[in-house]
Amino acid sequence: MSHSSDRPADQPPPETGADAAPGLRVYAIFHLNIAFSSIAEEARPALVARAYARLLDLAEAAPGPIGVEATGYTLEELARLAPDWIARLKGLVAAGRVTLIGSGYAQAIGPLMPAAANAWNLQLGRQAYADLLDAAPRLALVNEQTYGPGLPALYAEAGYEGLVMEWENCFRAHPDWPPARRYAPLRAAGSDGASLPVIWSHTIPFQKLQRMAHGEFEPQEFATFVAGHRPPPGGARRALCLYCNDAEVFDFRPGRFEAEPALAAESEWQRIADAFAAVAALDGVAFTDPTALLTEAAAGPALRLESASVPLPTKKQAKYTILRWAVSGRSSFTINTRCQRIADRLAADPAATAAQWKELCFLWSSDFRTHITADRWSAYKARLAGFEAALGLSPEAPPAPAPAVPSAPAESRLLTVETAGLGIALNRRRGLAVERCWLPEAPGNWLFGTLHLDHFDDILLGADWYSGNVVQQSPGAHQVTDLNPCAVTVDESDPDAVQVASVIGTALGPVEKRYRILRHEPELALDLVLHWPEVPRGLLRLGFVTLNPAAFDRRSLAYVCHNGGRVPDRHGLSQGEVEHGRPVSLLVSAGTALGVTEGRFEIGDDRHRLCISFDRGAAALVGQVTCRSVAETYFAQVAFSAAEVDDTSRAVQEGEPRLPLPFRIGFRIRLERGPAS
C-alpha cells in the first residue's frame, strides 16, 4: 500500500519557512462533499472543474502538504464522474502533497445516530479510501464538527489515530481553559475513559480565509492576521489551522444563500495560493502536515471537549446548532425517525448486509435535511420509501379521526392514584399535568411534578413549571399548550396497571393523553397523540419532567444518555448554568440538545434517579436540560423536542407536513434507587 500516512508520526515532512524550528506551524484542510445540500446533481461536473480540480492545482504548488477530507460517497461519485481526478488525487496522496483526512461513508451526524450506524459509517468510509485511493488516513475530521464524547472510541475502533475538531466551541464549553490551548493539540477524553489525540481546527481563521478569497481584503492582509498568532519570544511552539471547511465555495457557488458573493474575474483559488505563499514567507511560520502533530497531541493532557452546558459542541457561531439536523431543517425529525426504524431492523437481523448498512448511512446523511433542492428532496423521499419497502417496513397507518373534546365537569383539582409501585397526583385543571410523583415509602418527598409560581424568590422563575405537558411556540404567535381543564376517565380493570385518560382541547386541535401507572413497579407510561392538522413552524416540546429540588442533592445531581457512542455520556449538574433550550435569537429557538440515541435518559443524584425512555423508531426526539441556581436552591427540568426553528426550518414543497400527523409519542418513566449510571 502506498499513501502519505506511511510516514511515522514522529518524523514530519521537512517544514518550510524562515526558521529551522518555526514557532508557528500552520496547516489547511479542505472538506469535499459532492452531496452538498444545495448543489443540484447536474451541477456536479462544473463543481469538479471549478473547485475540485483547482484544489489539486493548489496542492501541487502549495508550500506544504494540503489536507483533503472527503466522504466515501463523494469519492465513489467522483470515480464515476471524473476518474482522472481520482487518479490525480491518488498520486498526490502517494507523493505526500495531499494528506488524506478521513470522514465516513456519508456526512452523517454522529451524536444523532446509534453507535452501530456510526461504526458502519466509519468502516465503510475507510473501505472506500482503501479501494479508490489505496490509502488509510490516520486523522478523521468529525462530521460537521459535531462532537460527542462517545465518538472517540468508535473512531479508534475504525483505525483512526486522531481527530480534527473545532477549537472555539470546545473553548465555549470550558471558558476556564487558557486561551493559548487553541494552539496545542491534546487528547479528547471519551465517555469510556479512553482518549484519542485531537488536532484543532479553527473557525475564525477559516472564515477569514473565505472572506479574503471572496475579495473582501487582500492575501497579504490574511498573512498579517496569521502573523499575529506567532508565539511571543521564548514562548511554546504553536499550531494553527488556517482553513477547515468546504472546498465548494471557491470559484463555485452552491446557491445556498441569496446573499452569496458574486464570482470575481480573478480565481479565488489563486487568491488562496497567494495567501499561503505570503504566510509561508513569514518569519517563524511554516506549513506542516497535520498528522505530524499526532505525537505532540498524544503527549498532551486528556480533557473532556464537552460540558454539561455544551454537551455536543458544533462548529461556528451560536446560531449554527445540531438542531438543524435533529428536529429542524426540512423534515429532520421525520428522517431521523425513519432511519432509526431502519437501523433497528438491521441491528435485529443477523443476515443484514454491508450494502444495507451502506444505504442507511447514505440516507442518514446531513445533506438531505437543510438547504436541499426540491428535485433532490423528491428523489430522496422516493429512495427512502423504496428502501423501507425492501425491508418490509410498512408506511405509517392512516390517521384516525380526531376525537371530540368532552366538557370538563366541575371536579376536584387533583386526581390521586396510589399503587404498591408509586404514587401520583394529576391536575384535572391543567391537562393532567403531574402535580407530584413519589415512591410509596416516602410520600412526602415527591421526586417530580409541578413547581408553582411562588416556589422561587426570583421573578425570572415566577411561573408554574409543570411535568407531563405539551408546549408549542411559533414566532409572533401565542403559545399553545395542553394545560386546560379536562374530563378524565379512570380504568382499574387491568390487574397490572391503573389507566387514566383524557382528551384535551387546544388551539391547534385535540390532544389525547393516557397514563398507565403500574401496580407493582415504580413506573408509569405516558402516551400522547396530537390530533393536529398541522404543526406550525416553531418549537414543539413535550414530556416535561420538573424535579423537586428538595428531593435531589445537587452536589451529586447528573444527567446521563447516549449521544452516538456505545457507552452513555454522564454530566454533573453540581455547578454552573445549563439551558439547552434557551433561544439563541429571534430566528433560532434553542442552542443545543442531546441525541439520546438509545432512547433512554436518566437524571438523578447518588440516592435515586428518574429513567425516561421512548422508542426512537416511533419518534426521534432530542433531550434538553435546564439547571439553574436560585439563591440557596436550584431549578432543574428536562424536556424532549420534536421541532425547533432556525434558518433551515422550512418546507420544501407546499402543503408538506413538518411532522408525521397525528403526532404520537410514548414515554416510560421509572423511579429507581441508586445513582444515574
Image: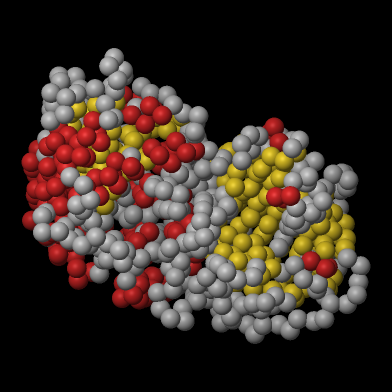
**Residue 423 appears in view:** yes
Relative height, residue 404 to residue 123 (above, below): below
Residue 104 vs residue 475, the one in the foreground? 475
Relative height, residue 23 to residue 542 (above, below): above
Residue, x 64% and y 70% (percent of image)? Answer: 478
Q: Residue furthest top?
A: 234
Residue, x 23% and y 51% (percent of image)? Answer: 216
Residue 175, how many percent across, how many down?
Answer: 49, 33
**Quarter-of-image position of residue 279:** top left
Residue 94, how many percent across, how many down?
Answer: 11, 39
In the image, 536: left or right of 220?
Answer: right
In the image, 430: left or right of 378?
Answer: right
**In the picture, which quadrant includes the N terminus?**
top left
Residue, x 33% and y 29% (percent of image)? Answer: 183
**Residue 96 appears in view:** no
Residue, x 17% and y 45% (percent of image)? Answer: 218
Residue 301, how many percent across, how many down?
Answer: 42, 24
**Quarter-of-image position of residue 163:** top left
Residue 340 vs residue 257, the one in the foreground? 257
Residue 68 vs residue 203, the one in the foreground? 203
Residue 252 vs residue 344, the one in the foreground? 252
Question: What number of labels is visible?
Answer: 0
**In the picture, which quadrant includes the C terminus?**
top right
